[in-house]
Amino acid sequence: MTPGGPNWLQPTAGSSAGGLPSLLPEPPEARVTRDADCLFCKIAGGEIPADVVRENERTLAFRDISPQAPTHVLVVPRDHHRDVASLAAAEPDTLAELVRTAADVAADEGIDAYRLVFNTGEQAGQSVFHVHVHVLGGRAMTWPPG
Ligand code: 5GP
Ligand code: ZN
């Protein structure tokens, strides 16, 4: 037998136990609401690679492709919502989890001062319309932001 056994014996991402897939409830990813044209839905679905630093059933944290600070991580819900207000209205628990995950990322990175940013709307700098919080840290931050 190959190390780790055949694929069907291995736990899938997000499931807590191995065993027979046919006896498990449907995998969490099957319940996720997705937008086929959305970059971050594709990253959350594993179609586009990213440097993932944390993940769980509801959220994913990965490094920004164009970092603006020594630590620049984006935390997103797996479900598609266009901005933070939409997420707050639809899934307040997930929004709280996004913020908890952001704090966990900062702790993992060894930074005790960090900035969380939810750009909302084009004029505020939002370019990807799948809600994400920027976790920025590792250098001094100025205020007001540009
Ligand atoms: P926004 O401008 O919407 O607040 O933030 C979007 C962020 O996504 C930007 O900081 C941008 O650098 C980042 N980004 C855009 N495309 C990709 C990508 O393909 N992979 C990763 N990891 N980050 C991306
Ligand atoms: Zn999306």
Image (cartoon, helix red, strand yellow):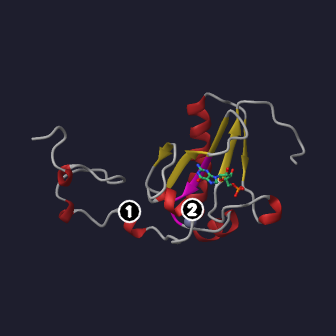
Q: Secondary structure at mark 2?
A: helix
- Name the one closer to the observer, 138 or 99: 138
Residue 120 lies, with reference to residue 68, above or below; the image says below
Q: Residue at x 68, y 32 (%)?
A: 70
Residue 30 found in image quarter: bottom left
For mark 1, what is the residue?
A: 28
Per the picture, the main secondary structure of the magenta-coloured stretch is: strand
For mark 2, what is the residue?
A: 39
Asked whether mark 2 and ligand 1 are closer than 8 Å, the reply comes as yes
Of tags 1 and 2, which is closer to the observer? 2
Q: Residue at x 15, y 44 (%)?
A: 5
* 3 to the left or right of 61: left
Q: Residue at x 47, y 48 (%)?
A: 55
Tell which residue pokes out farthest to the left in this image. Answer: 1
| Residue 36, x across and y down, in percent | 51, 72
Magenta residues, start to end: 74-79
- Asked if the residue at tag 2 contacts the one at tag 1, i.e. Cβ–Cβ closer than 8 Å, the answer is no
Quadrant assignment for the N terminus: top left
**Does residue 113 belong to the magenta stretch?**
no
**Does residue 77 belong to the magenta stretch?**
yes
* 97 to the left or right of 140: left
Q: Residues within 10 Å of mark 1 (few under 14, many from 20)?
A: some
Q: Residues within 10 Å of mark 2 (few under 14, many from 20)?
A: some
Residue 133 lies, with reference to residue 51, above or below; the image says below
